[in-house]
Amino acid sequence: MSRILIFTGKGGVGKSSVAAAHAYKSAKEGKKTLLVSTDMAHNLGDLFEKKLGKEAEEVMPGLTLYEIDPEYVMENDFADIMTYLTKLLASVNDMSIRDLGMIPGMEELFSLLKIAEIHKSGEYERIIVDCAPTGETLSLLKFPELLSWYMEKLFPIGKIGVRILAPVSKLVFKVEMPNKKAMSDIEKMYLKLAELQELLKDRETTSIRIVTTPEKMVVEETKRNYMYMNLYDFNVDGLYINRILPADIGNEFFDRWIDIQKGYIGELKACFAALPVCEIPWYDEEVRGEAAIRRIAEKVLGDRDVFGKRIITERERFTKTETGYSLELFIPCADKADIDLYQAANDIVIKLGNFKRNIPLPNILRTYVVSGAAFEEGKLRISFEKGGEEDE
């Protein structure tokens, strides 16, 4: 099964060059590799000094580049999904297929669906994803879960066991999958979203890698990025500190900056102690062209096992306890005072900073209520106890 590596970080930190170096190294190892960009401001063509079109293009043996145009993908590759969504939207509002691209998040959804389709085809052994800046990447990755949640609230999707299918609970509570032929278009769309969620959160397949630089604002955003990625249960398994000044410049002006960088590098290593950290020097020329990409691949990545499976944290999960059930989530870099949670009907709502996540409770917990919560060593544990009689 192919691996998916997703690179994210604040705008301007060098995500594309780091992703490109991984793709180059992968191809040189003899693995058929796809380097794909989901950033609307594509620059893979600029990096490799190639003019790219709307389809994937091989630029060297074993390495293919693909700058996704979500509107083109939406219109040419997913007629069935377009049908599902059109029927879904028509049942809520008087919308047509032409209106889909106007809905916030819809372009991101089709970019992810395209990556999932490529992964399912098995054509590539490794898929390297160069994402947009932090906020857009998080919106991209959490959109399938968010859309699934809204679909569940708006439509009767009981036949597919909505909460049982959720990746957070299906490992514990098993259910027989339905006959797809008997499902409605809306149910098929929901199932498609559930499969996409599972792919993105499958720690054996998908990894999130964060690229940063040793600067105050970037470091703070990097910590928030790590926190939010874990809030949504994604597997962050690597940190890349880019543009580190060499220690032997011998210039008073740069000596001051080198000291500042050392302080932030130390802070990053302390905050991300659980992750492998890769340090990338600040080169004396821009990263452009195959030679510049090869330099990072050979001198920085070198013999590192950057494609191995690294399961840093376990997936969030419901477990049986003596008094009921518990849900455990890993939220590193969070401040206990900033975490707010409450139970709303059949959901647990967790608010952290500017983000809010609704986690549907499995059916078995519909008569349980939150009895307590604790946040220790980066882990949030929520306890549930019986709170009422089950409906007849």
Image (cartoon, helix red, strand yellow):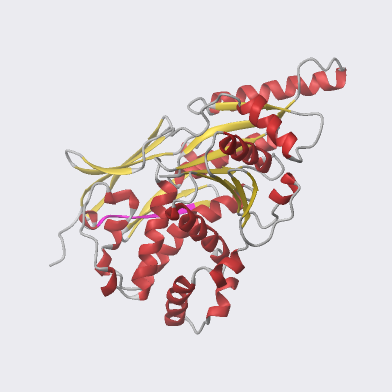
Instruction: Out of 226 and 286, give the one closest to the viewer.
Output: 286
Q: Indicate whether 213 appears above or below 160.
A: above
Q: Quadrant of residue 111?
A: bottom right
For the C terminus, the image quarter is bottom left
Q: Residue at x 55, y 71 (%)?
A: 76
Residue 173 appears in view: yes
Main SS, magenta region, reads: strand
Q: Left or right: where does residue 381 sit relative to residue 58?
A: left
Residue situated furthest bottom in the rendering: 94
Residue 358 falls within the magenta-colored stretch: yes
In terms of image quadrants, where is residue 365?
A: bottom left
Q: Give percent across and percent down for residue 345.
A: 31, 61
Please state the horizontal and vertical placement of residue 374, each as a whole percent of the image: 36, 37
In the image, is 235 to the left or to the right of 23? left
Inspect this view and state whether residue 242 appears: no
Q: In the image, what residue occupies the spot 72% across and 43% down?
A: 12
Whether 350 is among the magenta residues is: no
* Residue at position x 35%, y 73% in the image: 155
Which range is magenta? 356-362
Q: Residue furthest front?
A: 61
Q: Nearer the viewer, residue 7 or 361?
A: 7
Place residue 264 in its image quadrant.
top right
Q: Residue 24: where, in percent of width, then height?
A: 62, 38
Horizontal side of residue 347 vs 260, given as left or right? left
- Quarter of the picture holding the N terminus: top left
Name the residue rendered at 23%, 58% in the picture. Answer: 363
Number of numbered callouts drawn: 0
